[in-house]
Image (cartoon, grey):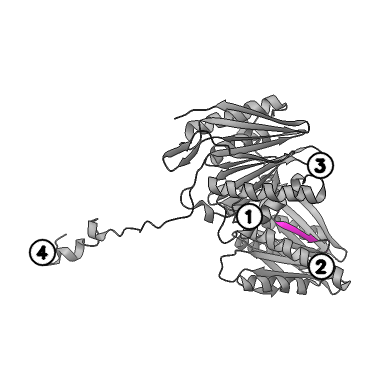
Amino acid sequence: MGGNKLNNFKHGTTTLGFVFKEGILLAVDSRASMGSFLSSEQVRKVIEINEYLLGTMAGGAADCQYWLAYLANHCRTYELKNGSKLSVAAASKFLQGILIGYKNSGLSMGCMIAGTDLSGQHLYYIDNDGMRLKGDIFSVGSGSTYAYGVLDNHYRYDLSLNEAVELGVRAIYHATHRDTASGGVVRVYHIHQNGWTKVHDGIDVVDLHYKFAQQKGLVGDGDEAKQRLF
Amino acid sequence: MYIPVNEVQKHFKSETPMMSNITHKSDQWSPYHDNSGTVLAIGIPGAVLVAGDTRLSNGYNILTRDATKLSQLTDKCVLATAGQYADFIALRKFLQQRLQLYEFQNEVQASTQTVAHLLSRELYSRRFFPYYTFNLLAGLDENNHGVVYGYDAIGSYDQMTYGVQGSGQELVVAVLDNQLKGYNKINKTFPQTQQEILDLILDCFSCAAERDIHTGDNVEILIITPTGTERIVKPLRKD
């Protein structure tokens, strides 16, 4: 780890979100890397903005943490002043406005804002270039290409909640398997008309690896290696 | 292969490392200096142990063998910083003053969680000219359970049970992952008592001092408990 340590902010991630008939599913990994060093395997990349809005973190961790907390503050102030909650479209637009102001300054953020309001559940992608996209499927981060492969293969709008959770978990697992900068545990959130629910707080991707291998019929679940070595 | 005499220059000029081919990067002044060293913190139920070596260096020079990297901000929390010492002093000054103001205004000391958030905001306020500091904030939470918050240079933070920062980070954190989390351990036995954790910390610093040139001289350990703070200083390799 030579060179300028100051520019090694925490990067590298896989986050994904998709809209389906039961609402929105968000799934993220939990690895934070500083250059080639793993600074943490337990990072929380879904930021709970308030009871009806969630934001995901990708890119610079400090930038995402700070500006999503700023957005939370703004949403609460709006709610108190106006007596009604800010819509997901307006909240994401507010964040976009801030990021356009800091364009080219070096901020690094690739967030998804997902939430529920009077018109339903909505998913937006916002990044530091000032891009704001509304969509049904997004994956952000260094492992996003791997997650898209799995997501695009099995996504249907009429997935059940369990199928959607399974799909999200599997997509993150495959991304962590192939992307060195993603790993740790999978966290899953579900957004529905009453707010959001944390479905999984942290499933270790190593456990998932052996579980999926067993489903494929590969029963070498580590015991063979253990017997041979010890 | 045969090269005609009058074409020799054309073939070799760009490949030979002659002085005329070397471009020197101009030595630009930088406001940042890495004074290095290692700090770590471990939280257990009822206490938190924070340790830092006392060596300050600048490149291959030792500036002093006797500088503290730890700063007690409130009765319940301690800031441990590795990186640039000047920025540590500036940050410490800001936090001490701001927390004193908090105590005057609220008639109670700030909780560890409050201090953690304050530190994050202060670090981010310098997003475009960062404090060159790698911080650990260690303290007791509302239930007197030891917690550690780890930061990067611009303020992103997360709660952890143990953390390491500084030049010996890669060396030490791998040991703690094995000893405290049981990663890659077959017989999972964990240190339970404060004395066992203390021994673990001393071992970690001895190891770091062996393999990291910037860590050494002494290790200073603060043990924060609900009843007070205890300070221990042990010598390390001075070479």
Q: Residue furthest left?
A: B5
Earlier residue among tags 4 and 3? 4
Callout 4 and callout 1 share a chain: yes
Taking depth in this image into account, of A22 and A76 the one nearest to the observer is: A76
Residue bounds of the magenta highlight: A44-52
Q: CA distance from mark 4 to mark 3?
A: 83 Å
The amino acid type found where label 2 is placed reads Thr
Q: CA distance from mark 2 to mark 1?
A: 24 Å
Residue identifier under label 3: B142
The amino acid type found where label 3 is placed reads Glu
Give the x, y percent position of residue B79.
65, 42
Residue identifier under label 4: B5
User: Would you say the residues marked 3 and 2 are in contact, meaning their CB atoms lie under 8 Å apart?
Assistant: no
- In the picture, the disc for residue A77 is 2
Q: CA distance from mark 3 to mark 2?
A: 28 Å
> Quadrant of the rendered structure where residue A58 is?
bottom right
Q: Residue at x 63, y 48 (%)?
A: B93
Earlier residue among tags 1 and 3? 1
